[in-house]
Image: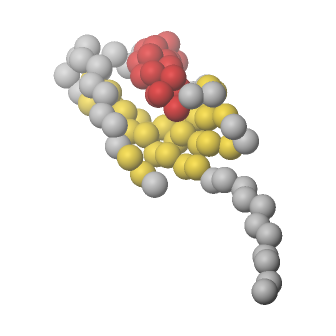
Amino acid sequence: MITDIYYFYKRGDSVKKCTVKLVWDDGIWYTKSDEELGIVLESGSFDALVERVRIAVPEMLELNCGYTGEILLSFEIERADNLKLRVVTA
């Protein structure tokens, strides 16, 4: 499932496109991102993780790259659940 959530952070004239993958695994949400962004966060709640990413991305781009322009932030969501199935025959 892919969902785009757009976050505009207006501080300049250009637009930086960033995609952060939010992954559900073993009861925890965590982030995966490209090397340029390099964001690593985790949370027990999807909404809390999205909010943490929305705060962290502009700060990280400014500190690591000196970027202070507009940001178009997209989230890609991945969730996999392990199920134990039992086959019952009649």
Q: Position of residue 23 (x, y in %)?
A: 59, 42
Q: Is residue 71 above or below residue 32?
A: above
- Asked whether 83 or 12 is in front, the reply is 83
For image coordinates 43% across by 40% down, the residue present is 75
Q: Is residue 80 left or right of residue 34?
A: right
Residue 65: x %, y % from top left: 46, 21
Is 37 situated above or below 22? above
Name the image colouring. Answer: secondary structure
Of 44 and 21, the residue lying toward us: 44
State the residue at coordinates (47%, 27%). Answer: 47
Considering only vertical position in the picture, is 85 above or below 23?
below
User: At 69% from the left edge and 37% from the top edge, which residue is drawn?
Assistant: 27
Residue at x 26%, y 14% (from the top left corner): 11
Residue 38 vs residue 16: left or right?
A: right
Q: Residue furthest front?
A: 90
Residue sticking out furthest to the left: 13
Residue 80: give x, y in percent of width and height. 63, 53
Q: In the rendering, at what x and y percent does residue 68 appear?
A: 34, 16
Q: Which image quarter: residue 90?
A: bottom right
Any part of residue 38 in sight: no
Say how many tags the image has.
Answer: 0
Left or right: residue 50 versus residue 39 is left
Q: Is residue 41 visible?
A: yes
Q: Quick one: 68 or 50, which is closer to the camera? A: 50
Quadrant of the rendered image containing residue 33: top right
Left or right, residue 49 beside residue 84: left
- Outermost residue toward the bottom in this view: 90
